[in-house]
Image (spheres, grey):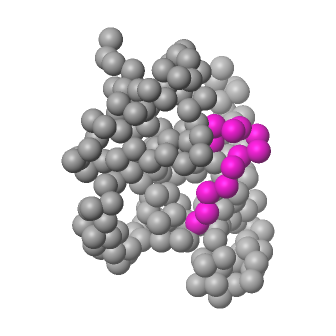
Amino acid sequence: MLSLESQIEAILFFNNEPISKKKLSTILEKELPDIENSLGILEEKLKDRGIVLLLKDDEVSLGTAPELSSLIESMRKEELNRDLGKAGLETLSIILYKGPITRAKIDYIRGVNSNFILRNLHIRGLIERIPNPDDQRSYLYTSSFKLLSFLGISKIEDLPEYSETNKELDKFTNNDKKEDNFNE
């Protein structure tokens, strides 16, 4: 079995967002002092690397080393200057017409994984990620004020054919649920 530090690093890498020390303790079935000790060891092991351990209050995450900020910034600028592309526009449309919506539902409607696209839209400030009140392990995606302003609308309902498109998306997701129940 790999060390506790390696296990924590793997969880932080996989999770790709901050996680509480208490949650790490629960997942790894270790006492909080053991988690904190291993975080100290991991922080030391990551010195002189491109990744650092970020600590804020009771949460911990992986991030890029501050010394590499100019490199990351140039990559971010390049990413922001690229066109959204068909997949980005498709995902943005789903969020506009059906948001707030979970990533799972977006993936279901699109038929493919949308992680990268959602990240790209989020970085550009076109969408926001809010806590999901029904499931603390996931988020809901919704349009940002920046996007509404860019589109020149004051509310989502001002989108072209909003009601009709919303109804069609509802039919699509409800018909597939009925078929799934039928096939079980």
Question: Residue at position x 64%, y 68% from top?
Answer: 143
Question: Residue at position x 48%, y 71% from top?
Answer: 124
Return the x and y of residue 171 as percentages of the image width and height.
72, 51
Return the x and y of residue 111 as percentages of the image width and height.
49, 46
Q: Quadrant of residue 126?
A: bottom right
In the rendered image, residue 133 lying in the magenta stretch gets the answer yes
Task: Check the image and name the residue furthest to the left.
Answer: 48
Tell me: 42 left or right of 167: left
Q: Is residue 75 visible?
A: no
Q: Which residues are magenta?
A: 127-138
Question: Which sits in the foreground, 96 or 12?
Answer: 12
Return the x and y of residue 86 as percentages of the image width and height.
42, 67
Question: Residue at position x 70%, y 27% from top?
Answer: 181
Question: Which sits in the foreground, 105 or 169?
Answer: 105
Return the x and y of residue 29 as percentages of the image width and height.
54, 15
Quadrant holding the N terminus: top left
Q: Is residue 165 visible?
A: yes
